[in-house]
Amino acid sequence: MENSVLDGLRRYIADHQLRDGDALPPERKLADELGVSRRELRAALASLEAAGQVWRGVGRGTYLGARPLKFAPTLRGLRAGASPADIAEMRLLFEPALAELAATKASRDDLLELEKCARKNAAAKNDDEWQQWDHRFHLLIGQATRNPALIALMEVINGMRVKPALREKTAAQTTRQFFAQQHQAIVSAMKARDGEAAARAMREHLLSVQGRVSAGRDDAVDSHA
C-alpha cells in the first residue's frame, strides 16, 4: 500500500508542476485529494523526508526538496569538504552508540517499522529503491532514541548522505542483500533489548559500508561476510 501512496504522491507533485521549495497542501487536504488516510500519507511523507526529497517543520508545513540550512541543524565540518570516506568514518563512531541507546528506548511501533524497512531493503530491485529504505532505516534508529539532540545529528548525517557525490551506491544485488541481512541483525538485537549486540551489529554493518566506500566497489562487502 505504501508504494502506491508514494506513487500517487509523486504523480500529484508532477501533475501540479511543483518544484523544490514549493509547499505541499496541509495533510488533511492532501490526503483527501489522494484518497488515502492521513496515516498512510504520513508514512509516505516520512519515506520522502528520509530520502531528502521533502522536509517538514512544526508550524511550517511540508516542502519539496532538502531542508534549507537556515531551518536545519548544522555542523560546519559537514557542510564543506566532507568526502564519502569522511561520512563513513563519522557514522562508524556515532551510529553504534545510537543503536545501543535505541535498543533500550524503541517502542513496539518503532521496531515494527524498522523490520518493515529491513524487509523493503531485502526486496529492493535497484539502488534508488534501496536508498529510500536505507535512509529511513537509519533515521528511524535515531528517532527511536527519543533524544532531540541525537535525532538532529542523525538528520544532518542523513542529509549529507543524500547528496549524489556522497551516496554509498549499491549497484549489485548481492550487496543489497548482504546489507539487508545486516539491517535485520540490528533489528533482532534491538527487539531483544540487547544494546551491546545492537551496537556490535551496527558497527559490523558500517565497517562493511566503510570498506566498500574505501575500495570503491560493491564486491568489497565480501571480505566482511
Image: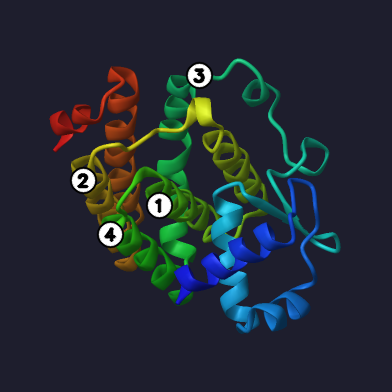
Tag 4 residue: 123
- Closer to the N terminus: mark 3 or mark 2? 3
Q: Quadrant of the C terminus?
A: top left
Q: Residues within 10 Å of mark 3 (few under 14, many from 20)?
A: few
User: Relative to 207, is 101 above or below?
Assistant: below
Secondary structure under tag 1 reads helix
At label 3, which amino acid type do we have?
A: Ser
User: Relative to 85, is 192 above or below?
Assistant: below
Viewer-side label of 3, 4: 4
Q: Rounded to the nearest whole Å, what is the CA distance between mark 4 and mark 2?
A: 12 Å
Q: Mark number for residue 189?
A: none
User: Relative to 45, is 180 above or below?
Assistant: above
- Closer to the N terminus: mark 3 or mark 4? 3
Q: Find residue 136 and report its horizontal and vertical position in percent.
A: 49, 55
At label 1, which amino acid type do we have?
A: Glu
Q: Quadrant of the N terminus?
A: bottom left
Tag 2 residue: 178
Q: Find residue 204 and report its horizontal and vertical position in percent.
A: 27, 39
Q: Residues within 10 Å of mark 2 (few under 14, many from 20)?
A: some
Viewer-side label of 2, 1: 1
Q: Rounded to the nearest whole Å, what is the CA distance between mark 3 and mark 4?
A: 29 Å
At label 2, which amino acid type do we have?
A: Phe
Q: Look at the numbered discs 3 and 4 and tell me whether their residues touch, using CB distance below 8 Å.
A: no
Closer to the camera, 150 or 7? 7
Secondary structure under tag 4 reads helix
